[in-house]
Image: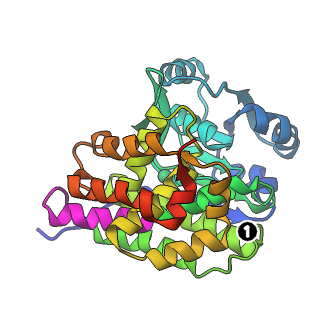
Amino acid sequence: MANEGMSIPIPDVLEIDHGVLGQLESILKKHRFQRAIILFDSFSSEHYQGRIIENTSGVSVDCLTLDLTSSIYDLIDKAFQLDRYDVVLAIGGGSIIDFGKYVAFSRRTPFISIPISPSNDGFASSNCSLFVNGKKTTVPAKVPYGIIADLSIIQHAPTPFILAGIGDLMSNITALYDWAFEEKHGYSQGNAFATMLSKKAVNSFIRTPMDDLRQKIFLKELMSSLTMGGISTVISGNSAPISGAEHMISHALDKTSKNPQMHGIQVGVCTYLMSLVHEHRVERMVKVFSRTGFFEHVKQTPFDRDEFIHAIDLAPSMKPTRYTYLHERKYREKAKQLIETDPYLKEMIKNP
Ligand SMILES: [Zn+2]
């Protein structure tokens, strides 16, 4: 029988532009949501709750601020204490978006994510990162039903958050390279469409002018590309098109470092390292990370060398069923060597 193709849930609401948060009420009405709950973190509650309540007086909206130290168990409890809503929204940083995604997933309710910074691709992806037994752990959920990214809010994100988003997006390049390597070794079956989407996302981004990180066209490109990357994981059914060995080093740092840095910052440095290991598109990495000020930023708050080297050794154990370059000892040795010799890495990863 001929393959009928796949049915893939992709976001129904996709608004990436200036001022789109002001259209929240009409978006909810258009999609026939009558009873919504919006989750906030303390920052987004302070800055946006009043405005949202004012702008959504024509629909029933409840607001709830969650504690960002909540564990997965707290969230499940919370999810089942809630009344029945026909949509869950979350506005704020990556953690509250992940919480909202999981609460909505637990209750089988559509989820709309409203990121206020571009710091990673979590606002568009199907996974979330939650505390399980005290450790940040990747937990499967569902891709958001909707994404509302108001560029007039995102424009004011602190610079490191924008740089983090760039780091997370650039990792599509190394992730795809690892995924192809894995397929070549018979550990997984790639997916041509997911590969194309993830690749197009990052390639479109790197052609955007980068002299002003707050320029509308730049932020729109960054947010759209992160979104496309997120959607590629729905198609592949796993995170492989946007997450390779660079993410495994970052996960290891999250588990072992005394002071883990932002996800996208860690991933960006590891992406550059992996491009050197792969000997693939290094020049492009240097261009993007230099022009945007990413390297310069990390130099100001360098990584601890010993922790980083330990994280490289631990990387394969983060995803033991996968087979990236770092699952081979010789490439782990090469990575560790590069930390001692590469001029950029030497400045970003050093002894305290
Ligand atoms: Zn990531």
Q: Do we see residue 153 in this rendering? A: yes
Above or below, 223 relative to 260: below
Residue in view at x 32 percent, y 44 percent: 313
Residue 36 screen position, x and y as percent: 68, 37
Q: Which residues are magenta?
A: 172-190
User: Who is closer to the viewer here, 71 or 177?
Assistant: 177
Q: Do we see residue 107 in this rendering? A: no
Please identify the quarter of the rendering in which residue 330 is found.
bottom left
Badge 1: residue crowd in 10 Å (few <14, some 14–19, many ≥20): some
Residue 300 screen position, x and y as percent: 68, 53
Above or below, 209 relative to 154: below
Above or below, 175 relative to 321: below
Above or below, 48 relative to 168: above
Q: Quadrant of the N terminus?
A: bottom left
* Count of residue discs: 1
Residue in view at x 53 percent, y 39 percent: 101
Residue in view at x 77 percent, y 67 percent: 214
Residue in view at x 84 percent, y 40 percent: 47
Q: Which residue is tagged 1?
A: 213
